[in-house]
Structures are given as structure tokens and as C-alpha cells.
Image (cartoon, rainbow, N blue to C red):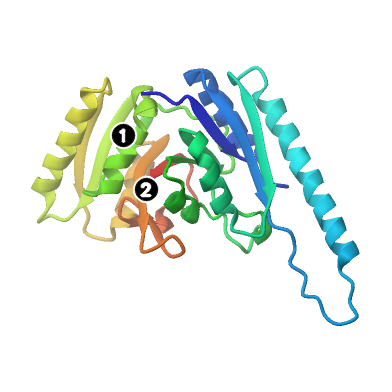
Amino acid sequence: MTYKTLMVHLELNGDNEGVLKVAGELAERFDAQVIGIAACQPIQVLVSEGFNAGEEITQEWAEIERELATAESQFCAALRGRAKRMEWRSTITYGPLADYIADQARAADLIITGKDIGPSLLDESRRVKVGELAMRAGRPILIVPMGITGLAMRHVLVGWKESREARRAVVDALPLLQAAGQVTVLEVTSQHEHAAAQARVKDVALWLEQHQVEAAGEAIVASGTEAGYLHAALLDRRCDLLVAGAYGHNRLSEWVFGGVTADVLLDPIFCVLVSH
């Protein structure tokens, strides 16, 4: 298994340096083609009697088209010579941006995007809600926090939870896990469940070894919050990449990584691969 086609999402007027550098690095590693993608919602003008919004709408669309063209230029400049083949896709839509990217994900093995930093910091019309994308895409998503410009993969942690989503994430991450220097399958559990958890992570580690991944299983007992213990473990073990299942009550509400709320990743210093 490998990644033959990557899809990298660019934010309009955003900092795309990290996602583009990671996409280029992975394109070279896997000899993959790369699809660049961007989307934007135009302003929705409430038209009142005697008010002509035509000129304002025309200017808005022209500005969006300029922003899309700039993003395409950034994509081409960053990936030229690194990707096996390049393709650009973009749209102006009144629908959710995550829906457009999820639909286009049919053409890719892996989606690369930036961290969702919240509506208060970025225009909603240009912000892709990563939680919605994770629920809709049917493809693994590699989230690259701002400031990260490479994927070292010296130590990859699998945040294990006994769930369909976690099993799916490990399979989807296999190409990266096979390239990792060290892999730890980690489950945060209670004292009562510790023995069972240790058996689970051992099973996963043995399965990974059958797929040319050097892995170890570890179950740690949490006396406090699961999220707090996982976050501390990730930092203590110098995690370069976290792999976890993503699921929520529905695609518009709370979503979680391996059973732990997204609070654990509010300010990560590592990349995250999630799968649903």
C-alpha cells in the first residue's frame, strides 16, 4: 500500500507554507501526483428595495478569483519538480467548503490541510471546518499545524481506542508508519481496564510488525482526564505524528480523536493523521 495521489488544501489569504512543504516532501517520498484544491464562499447580500448589489457582488467575485489564482500560483511554485504530476481544482460555492473538498477527495488517497483555527480568527467564507471534512471525506486527513514545515516521523504515536475508526486510521496510515523510525501504539485507560488495554495494543503492534512496521504497544493508566494524560504522553515521547480515529455525534457537532476531545490538540506541535 502507498499513496499515489495526494490532495493538498490551500486557504485563501492564509499561511500555506507548511502544508505545501509537507505535500512536496510526501510527493517525493511516495512518487505521488498532487492535486491542489481551494474553495471560497462569496458574500451573501441581503437585497432590500431600492438597493442594487450588482456592483458589490461583481467586485467580490473578481477578488475571489484573484485569490484563487494566487493560491494556484503558490501551489505550482511549491510542487513543481517535486510531484509526479500536478493538477489544480477550485470553486466558488454557496455550500459548505468541506463538502466540496470531500466530494473531490474521491480522486485522492490522502488529504493534507492546515489546522482548523476557529471562526473568530479566520473568515468563515474561507475556512474549512476540519471536523466536517473528517466526517465527510472517506479519506485520511493529515492536519499540519501552523509553523510545521516538515514531517520527520522519527516517532509516530497511534492513539488507540477500541473502535472501528481507530482500526481504519491504522490501515490508512500504513505508508507513513512504514516510513517511521519508531511507532508506539498507545492507549490511555483505567486501572480496571489496564490488562485488557495492554492486550489490545500488543495485538495492534504485532499486526503492524507483519506489515514491516517496528512497533511497540503501551497502555497507561490515567487517574485524571484521558485528554490530559494523552497530551502529556505525546509531549513526553516527542511525538512527530499522531495517528487516530476521528468520530463525533454528527458531522456538525463535537468530534474527537480516538475518544479524546479535540481540546488535546488546541495547540499541537506535531502533525495529526485522522480517519473516520
x%, y% of residue 39? Answer: 66, 48
Mark 2: secondary structure: loop
Of 105 and 27, nearer the camera is 105
Q: Residue furthest bottom?
A: 49
Q: Is residue 54 visible?
A: yes
Residue that appears at 49% across and 19% down: 29
**Residue linked to disc 2:** 276
The crowd level at tag 1 (other Cα within 10 Å; few <14, some 14-19, many 20+) is some
Residue 67, placed above or below residue 18: below
Q: Amino acid at mark 2?
A: His
> Percent x, y for residue 201?
18, 39
- Residue position for label 1: 171
Report x, y in % for residue 77: 72, 26
Whether residue 159 appears in this view of the structure is: no
Task: List x then y, in percent, for residue 69.
Answer: 77, 39
The image quarter containing residue 2 is top left
